[in-house]
Structure formats: C-alpha cells, structure tokens
Amino acid sequence: MRKWYLLLCILATIILCSCGGKPIFNFTLEQLDKMITVVSEDKELGEYIKNIQAVEISSSETEYWYSIKGELTKSFDELSTEKQYKKFARVVELMQKNQGEIIGYSEFYCGEKSKCSIIRINLKTPKHTYEVEYYPDSESQFLKKDDSIVYDSETTDGIYIDPFETEDNKEDVNTDTKKQSDREFSKTFSNYNKEFYEIFKNNLDLIGSNFELIHEGNYSPALIGDLITWIEEFNEIIDVYESKAIPITKADQELYIITNDMVTNQREANAYILKGLNNEGAKSLIEAGEYLNSSIDLYTKGYNLIQ
C-alpha cells in the first residue's frame, strides 16, 4: 500500500502532461434471489413483510455489497421489541440456510471468483425504520429502530445498556471480570471490524493496482473513469463505519477511535485524488499523499489490534 504515494505522483505528472463498465467474472445472483424468495414466501413473516429486495450499494471489479430493504405492515410497530427482533432473526435464519456454498470471504455464493457481502437488513413501516446487521454464520445482536438500539439479544431482558452512560455507583459488578471484559472485543464489533478492515484493504489494493497500470504506461480515459467510480464507491463503504460500528467494551472504543481517524484521513485522501482525476488540479494528487500515509499508518495500528 505504501506504493500509493509514488504512484499518485506519477499519475499527477501524467495528467499535467496530458492537459465503462466493470468486467464481471463468473458472477451470479441466483443464490441471492433464492434467499429473498424464501423470505418473501415464509408464512410466519407474511403477516408483516409487504415486500423485500436486495439492493446493491457498492461494487468493485469482483466484489459486491448489498443491503436487504423492504416494507413492513404498520402492525409490526405494535409488536414488542423482543418479537420484532425475533422476526428479523427469522429473516436472517432463512437467508443463512439458503446462502449456498460460501467461498473465501463471500457471505453467499455469487460465483467462484466473486465476493459478495450483505451489510444490513433494513425494513420500514410507515412510521419507523428497523435494522439489523447481517452475518452469514451468526445472529445479529442488536435491533435498531430509527438508528437507536432497542433490543440486545445478549442481555437477559433484551435491554441495551450503553457502556459509556452507566452509573458510577454500580459497584456490585465483579471488578476483575469487568477489567477482563473491557480488554476484549465484543463479538459483534469484532466481526464487523474484521470484515471492514478486509474490505478497506481490498479497495486500496484495487485502486493501487490500477495506478500501477498507469505507471506501466496503460494510461487511458477509460481507466481514469474506472478509478473515479471505484473511489466514489470506496467513499460509500467507509462512510457507514461510524454509524454501523457499535463499540461496547473499552477495547472496542479504542479500535473505534483509531478506525474513525483512519476513515477521516482516507476520505480526505480520496477527495484530493478525485479532484486530480477530474482535472481540477493534478497537484492535489500529491497533496493526497499526506492523508493517505496517515490512513495506512492507522490501518496497520487497527489491523494489529484485531488480530
């Protein structure tokens, strides 16, 4: 990833001197269509789900990210939060049972050389929006309603307790146990961050490899267009981190701060790169280097924490 800075300088020089579609490899959505069909035809869910579909939110050359979106009947609002969570758990269960053979880091089968991920399941009634994160091999811990956590499946009563708003006088908690848990990542947070860091690296590698093509003399308007598209899609991916990553323990919070800083620096780097690629100032590609180096340093720091 350190090659980026040199490649940005080279690209800046090329653009200063010189002043599409993405290929699909063995890609199929047949399995995803089956997952959605099974959910839409389920009798238990039929009373509440009016419609449901998979929506692509981002993609690269061989990687694709989806959200599951749909509409709920207004009667869903009248259920208890526990029952609401169980309905979403049923959706997750059915999708997991029909996701097909998982290859590598893909969350459902979409081709031997393609990687596909489902970021979240987001369903709306006329009044409210409900959401859970999707994992291919585990339950979703939290149910959100209008961006607030309303149910935690890992507590006995389902009530989510914000670790940063607890009362100081709750001294009946075993101190040694609390210290141990604070040093560990919560399961949901750890799973999400491992996936996020993998996606982050893959996007850097994808864009960096195309800068290398330019370095090798393969500069073309079509390639510049692809780079602009991929960087814009990269921005969409990193923009969801702050709202999706929910820190529970002190270890979570430490990684959350590092990763948010990484995202901020990468967003700044991407903005300068896009400015240069759009012929709004090729020197801005060089200016992106400072933010990019900071982003990579923070990536290394955060990645080492979760290994």
Image: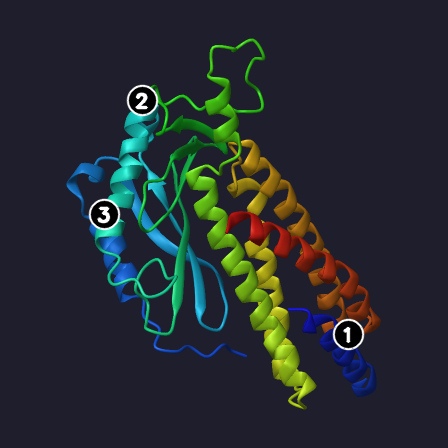
Q: Circle 2 sits in a helix, a strand or a loop, which is it?
A: loop
Front residue of 240/246: it is 246
Q: Which mark is residue 94?
A: 3
In the rendered image of this protein, does residue 98 appear above or below residue 250? below
How is colour applied across the structure in the image? Answer: rainbow
Is the C-beta separation of discs 2 and 3 under 8 Å? no
Mark 2 and mark 1 lie on one chain; the one further toward the N terminus is 2
Compared across the picture, whether 17 is left or right of 106 comes to right
Front residue of 38/92: it is 92
In the rendered image of this protein, does residue 156 appear above or below residue 18? above
Q: Based on the displayed image, in which of its 4 quarters is residue 260 positioned?
A: top right
Quadrant of the snapshot with the N terminus: bottom right
Q: Amino acid at mark 3?
A: Leu
Q: Circle 1 sits in a helix, a strand or a loop, which is it?
A: loop
Q: Amino acid at mark 1?
A: Asn
Separation of marks 2 and 3 at Cα, in angstroms: 22 Å
What percent of the width, then of the height, locates residue 194? 48, 52
Separation of marks 1 and 3 at Cα, in angstroms: 48 Å
Residue behind mark 1: 279
Say which residue appears at 66% left-offset and 53% top-offset.
Answer: 298
In the rendered image of this protein, does residue 216 appear above or below residue 104? below
Residue behind mark 2: 80
Say which residue appears at 37% left-offset and 62% top-offset.
Answer: 106
* Whether residue 179 can be seen here: yes
Name the outermost residue toward the left. Answer: 43
What percent of the width, then of the height, locates residue 146? 48, 32
